Amino acid sequence: MATQKNIIDQIFPETLKILSELIKFQTVSGTSNLKLIEYCEKRLDKLGATSFKTFDETKKRVNLFSTIAGKQKLNGGGIILSGHTDVVPASAKEWSSNPFVATEKNNKVYGRGSCDMKGFIACALAVAPYFASQNLKKPIHFSFTYDEETACQGAPIMIRELKKRNINCSICIVGEPTSMKAIQAHKGCYEYSTHFTGLAGHGSAPDKGVSAVEYAVRFINKLMELREELKKRVPKNSVFTPPYSTLQIGRIKGGLARNVIADQCVVDWELRPVVPEDGKFVNESMETYVKDVLLPEMKKVYPKANIEKEIIGEIVGFAKEEKSDAVNLACNLTGDNSQDVVSFGTEAGLFQEIGISTVVCGPGSIEQAHKIDEHVSFEQLKLCLKMLINLKEKIIN
C-alpha cells in the first residue's frame, strides 16, 4: 500500500506542471479568465466531474463549480476546495523573470499568482484524480472564481447559483496563502469611490463656482471624524489587531490647475468593519451628511451639482465561530493546531454567510502575494498536497 510520502512524490511533478500552465494564463483582475477555466474544466470533466458555470455581464469572466461524486454517486453535503483565478497586474520590467512564465529556482516556483493563489488550485487539480478513484462517501467540490482581487465580484454570483440549485455543502476550504495555517476570521472590506460634480470657473471668483475638490475635502474630514468614532465602538472580545473597524482614504483625484475651480473629483476609500453594524454606521452617517449638509450647499450655486457613491465591492467579514468544523478539520489535516486571524479579505465570509463552515488555509505566505518576484516554495505545495490527501484518508473514505 502506497504511503502518504509516496503519493505526494507521485503527484508533485504533476502539481508543478499544472501550476506552470496556470501561470501562463494572464488572468489579471478585470480581464477574461475563460481559457483558464476551460483548462480546469477539461481536466475535471475527464474524471467524470459534473460542472456548471456562471458568468459576468460580458460573458468574458466566469466561475466554475465542479463536483466529483465518487463511486457512490452521492451528491449531498461534501467539501468545497475554493480558489480565485485572478491575479494582480505585474510589470515584466520589474521582475527578475517573466511574471507569466513559471520559473523554478531554489526549490521555489516564481510567477504571478504562484502564491496568490494558483498554487492551491494546482494542488487541488493534481489531487483530483486521486479523489475520483476512491469510494467517496461525500462529494468533493471545486470552486474557481473570477475577480476576487477586486472586491470578490465573482463569488457572489456563483453562491447565488448554489442556493438556486439547492447544493448543500458542509465545509469549505479557501486556499488563500496562509503558510498552511488555519485562519478562523478576518474583517470585512468595503471599497467605494465617491464622485463629486461641481461647477468649473475662474479661480479669482470662487463664489461663482462649486469646487468639487473642496467638497471632497470636507467629505474626507467627515470620514476622519468617523474613524475616531469607530475606535470607541470596539466589540467585546474582538480577536483583531487593531480590535476596532478601520477606515482609510486611498486616493483623491480632481481638478485641472491651481487657478481653475474644479468641477470633478473622486475619492477612493475603504472601510474594514469588524462587525456589519459598523459598516452600516459609517454609510448611514455619510449619506446623512451628504444629503443634509454638502449637497444643499452645492446646489444653491449649481442645481446640477451632485455627489454619487460607487460601490466597488463589499466583502463580508469572516466571523470567528466558537466551534468550527472547518477549522478543526484543517488543524486535523495539517497536524498544526495553531489558529489565527488575518487582516486581508477573502471569499470565506460569503460561504459562511450561507451556512457553510469555512476555513482559510493554503500554501504560500501572504508576504509574497502581490509582490515583485512572487513565489511559492516546493515545501508549501507539498504541505498542501499532504492536507488534501489526508482529507481523502481521514474524512471521506
Image (tube, rainbow, N blue to C red):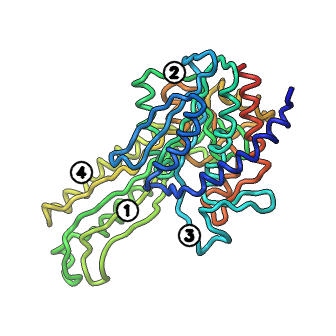
Contact between marks 1 and 3 (CB within 8 A): the answer is no
Q: Position of residue 179 (x, y in %)?
A: 73, 46
Label located before the other in sequence (2 or 3): 3
First in residue order: circle 4 vs circle 2: 2
Mark 4 or 1: in front is 1
Residue found at the very far front of the displayed protein? 46
Q: CA distance from mark 1 to mark 3?
A: 26 Å
Q: Is residue 382 above or below residue 74?
A: below
Give the label, 2 or 1, closer to the camera: 2
Of the residues under marks 1 and 3, which one precedes in the sequence?
Answer: 3
The type of residue carrying mark 2 is Asn
Tell me which amino acid carries mark 3.
Answer: Ser
In x, y percent, where is residue 359?
A: 63, 34
Dot label at residue 168: 2
Discs 2, 1 touching: Cβ within 8 Å: no
Q: Are marks 4 and 2 in contact (CB under 8 Å)?
A: no
The structure residue drawn at horizontal position 79% and vertical position 40%, both measured from the top left corner, is 10
Q: Which residue is mark 3?
A: 91
> Can you say whether 254 is above or below 300 in the image?
below
Residue 257 in the image: above or below residue 94: below
**Could you say which is closer to the camera, residue 397 or residue 133?**
133
Question: Which residue lies under the disc numbered 1?
Answer: 267
Task: Evaluate whether residue 194 shows in this view.
Answer: yes
Location of mark 4 (residue): 292
Q: Quadrant of the N terminus?
A: top right
Residue placed most toward the observer, 238 or 386: 386
Q: Earlier in the sequence, mark 2 or mark 1?
A: 2
The label nearer to you, 1 versus 3, is: 3
- Gap between marks 2 and 1, in whole Å? 40 Å
Cα–Cα gap, marks 4 and 1: 19 Å
